[in-house]
Image (cartoon, rainbow, N blue to C red):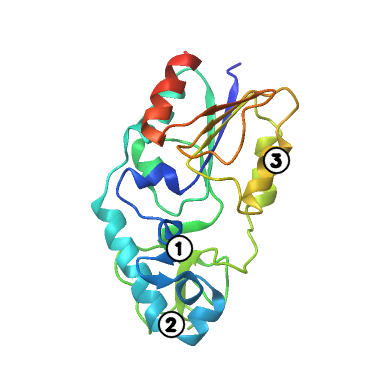
Amino acid sequence: MKKHIVVLTGAGMSAESGLKTFRDANGLWEGHDVMEVATPEGFQKNPELVLEFYNQRRKQLLEVEPNSAHKDLVELENDYKVTIITQNVDDLHERAGSRNVMHLHGELLKVRSTGNELDIKSWTKDLMLGDLCLKGYQLRPHIVWFGEAVPMIEKAIEICVTADILIIIGTSMQVYPAASLMHYIPDDTPIYFIDPKPAIDSRGHLKVIPETATKGMKILKESLR
């Protein structure tokens, strides 16, 4: 049986494909305060602004491509069972070819009904006020906003418990509940942490690779072989 690699990825994974993160500019995301465009309160206050913000993010996503780090994770599937748990809302892991991807914070290319959170559909065009579900409720981005529950966290914990190897890429592991996942990894499981400015020290079974996602994955891929 193949060993199970669990991969936790964050914004640094997609940054080299050209997708910006709100943490790059003092809490601003593409010039907007995240509280205005990434909270339920922001959506209630100014839905047009929020919808347009995600329309722009969606357009940007459709213009970029997976980078070599995404592709290197796909190559690991030749020798390992690989499950990716990502905080990212893009589809770059899937486009690269990864077969097992869980999105903790939702997906940019999906929308859901404001009247039924289980009514989810694929969406690649602009989302406008007046775009409704079949029951007449406004559609919203299928994104977990700040202040909302993370519905996939329990399933993510179940996956982490089965890890033989943990790889963390492009996330500071400072944002909860996602940051708590590494605590569910079995004892003595090797942990590889790829981040150019890691906020964590190498100790015990944790090895820090202080590189970008693309450089770090090249190093790690060779060592895992």
Question: Residue 26 has which mark?
Answer: 1
**Dot 2 corresponds to which residue?**
47
Q: Amino acid at mark 1?
A: Asn
Residue 6 seen in this snapshot:
yes
Give residue 112's position: percent from left, percent from top: 49, 69
Q: Earlier in the sequence, mark 2 or mark 3?
A: 2
Real-space Cα separation, disc 2 to disc 3, in angstroms: 35 Å
Please rate how many residues cluster around mark 1, counting C-alpha atoms within 10 Å: few if below 14, some from 14 to 19, many from 20.
Answer: few
Q: Based on the displayed image, in which of its 4 quarters is residue 78 positioned?
A: top left
The circle on residue 158 is 3
Image vertical order of residue 154 relative to residue 70, above or below: below
Which secondary structure, mark 1?
loop
Quarter the N terminus occupies = top right
Q: Residue at x 63, y 59 (%)?
A: 150
Measuring 36% from the left and 47% from the top, which residue is drawn there? 15
Q: Is residue 40 left or right of residue 213?
A: right
